Image (cartoon, rainbow, N blue to C red):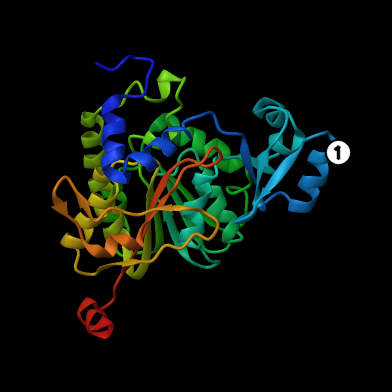
């Protein structure tokens, strides 16, 4: 019987099956409160000026090696950071390091048509907008009313809404958007709602008190629906990035395996993240063999600075039969 103030034993047993006992034990040691991390919002702020401003008032930060606009706060508190003019003016945005990864994999470019399907509170949306230099078309959607208005507020604060470009906020179910915009977007980010296992903190029961295998099944059902909606809205030749902050294979590899099985035009592309250690993606779970191509996905090995994360990158082939022949 698991105690309410301890991470569920069943979760750890599942983690051992995924990674082996040694790796699972090391992962468990990372379930701590991580340092505050933030990103320079280049729509409104300049990296050099932000650094100078923070250091002038006593903030100590480390630069993130794989993303020069990202920083780790080494002294003071998150609240101290939110009290700065930089934060209040939207020149910096507090965001977990793992959350910054999927836009990098999506690699948005100026002039593209991009959809962030489950966008609130807008961390990744604002990062995508900055990477696009606010040129092209970006749609940010979230069907939860409370989360939508948080998204709206953040887009205004960060200057995404004010920029002179085609930026749209929507509050729709994924299927509704896919029906309205069939085969329309060049790139889609689906950072899916999930069981958030990678965000467990050992001495904070609220971070894991909700967890159960039923919760995993519930989230997996939602993810399947969202994945199909995203696929229908993606144009041939387009790129879909799917990500979660959970370890559960039902929400990660099994979702991608199902998409590959159902959609002959779906093909995985390799995800490469120099500077971030990797856990091998699964090609078997509970006696079920999965496609070997899933090794091209990426499971970030969590540390005390970055949480675990799963990322898959899929292209919608224009001519699956021809592309398949070309691979042989």
Residue located at (67% from left, 42% from top): 92
Q: Is residue 270 left or right of residue 179?
A: right
How far across and down, in percent of the image, does residue 100 sit? 53, 49
The furthest residue to the front = 22
Furthest-left residue in this view: 287
Relative to 163, residue 317 above or below: below
State the quadrant of the C terminus: bottom left
Quadrant of residue 319 within the rendered picture: bottom left
Check the image and report above or below for 323 versus 254: below
Residue at the extreme right: 56
Residue 218 visible in the picture: yes
At 35% from the left edge and 20% from the top edge, which residue is drawn? 209
Q: Nearer the viewer, residue 58 or 152?
A: 58
User: How many labels sit on residues?
Assistant: 1
Can I make out residue 246 in this image?
no
Question: The N terminus appears in which quarter of the rendering?
Answer: top left
Q: Nearer the viewer, residue 239 or 195?
A: 195
Question: Residue 46's x, y, as percent?
Answer: 75, 52
Circle 1 sits in a helix, a strand or a loop, which is it?
helix
Q: Position of residue 31 (x, y in %)?
A: 46, 31
Residue at the (61%, 55%) spot, across then down: 67
Where 302 falls versus 261 (above or below)?
Answer: above
x and y percentages locating residue 96 in the rendered image: 54, 40
Residue at coordinates 29% horizontally, 60% vertically from top-left?
294
Q: Is residue 29 left or right of residue 51?
A: left
Judging by the rendered image, the residue that carries numbered circle 1 is 56
Q: Residues within 10 Å of mark 1 (few under 14, many from 20)?
A: few
């Amino acid at each position: 019987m698991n105690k309410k103030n301890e991470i569920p034993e069943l979760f750890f047993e599942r983690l051992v099956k995924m990674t082996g006992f040694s790796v699972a034990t090391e992962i468990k040691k990372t379930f701590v409160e991580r340092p505050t991390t933030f990103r320079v919002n280049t729509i409104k702020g300049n990296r050099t000026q932000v650094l100078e401003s923070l250091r002038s008032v006593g903030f100590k930060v480390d630069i993130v090696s794989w993303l020069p606009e990202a920083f780790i706060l080494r002294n003071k508190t998150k609240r101290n950071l939110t009290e700065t003019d930089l934060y209040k003016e939207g020149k910096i945005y507090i965001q977990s390091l793992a959350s910054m990864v999927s836009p990098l994999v999506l690699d948005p470019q100026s002039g593209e048509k991009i959809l962030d399907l489950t966008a609130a509170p807008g961390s990744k949306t604002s990062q995508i907008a900055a990477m696009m230099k606010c040129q092209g078309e970006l749609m940010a959607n979230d069907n939860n009313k409370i989360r939508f208005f948080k998204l709206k507020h953040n887009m205004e604060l960060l200057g995404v809404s004010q920029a002179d470009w085609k930026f749209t906020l929507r509050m729709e179910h994924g299927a509704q958007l896919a029906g309205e915009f069939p085969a329309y977007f060049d790139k889609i980010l689906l950072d899916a709602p999930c069981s958030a296992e990678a965000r467990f903190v050992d001495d904070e029961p609220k971070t894991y008190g909700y967890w159960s295998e039923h919760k995993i099944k519930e989230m997996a059902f939602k993810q399947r629906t969202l994945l199909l909606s995203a696929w229908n809205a993606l144009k041939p030749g387009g790129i879909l990035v799917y990500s979660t902050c959970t370890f559960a294979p039902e929400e990660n590899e099994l979702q991608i395996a199902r998409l590959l099985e159902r959609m002959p035009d779906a093909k995985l592309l390799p995800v490469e993240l120099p500077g971030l250690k990797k856990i091998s993606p699964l090609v078997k779970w509970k006696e079920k063999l999965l496609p070997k191509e899933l090794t091209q996905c990426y499971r970030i090995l969590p540390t005390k600075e970055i949480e675990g994360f799963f990322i898959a990158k899929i292209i919608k082939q224009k001519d699956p039969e021809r592309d398949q022949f070309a691979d042989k």
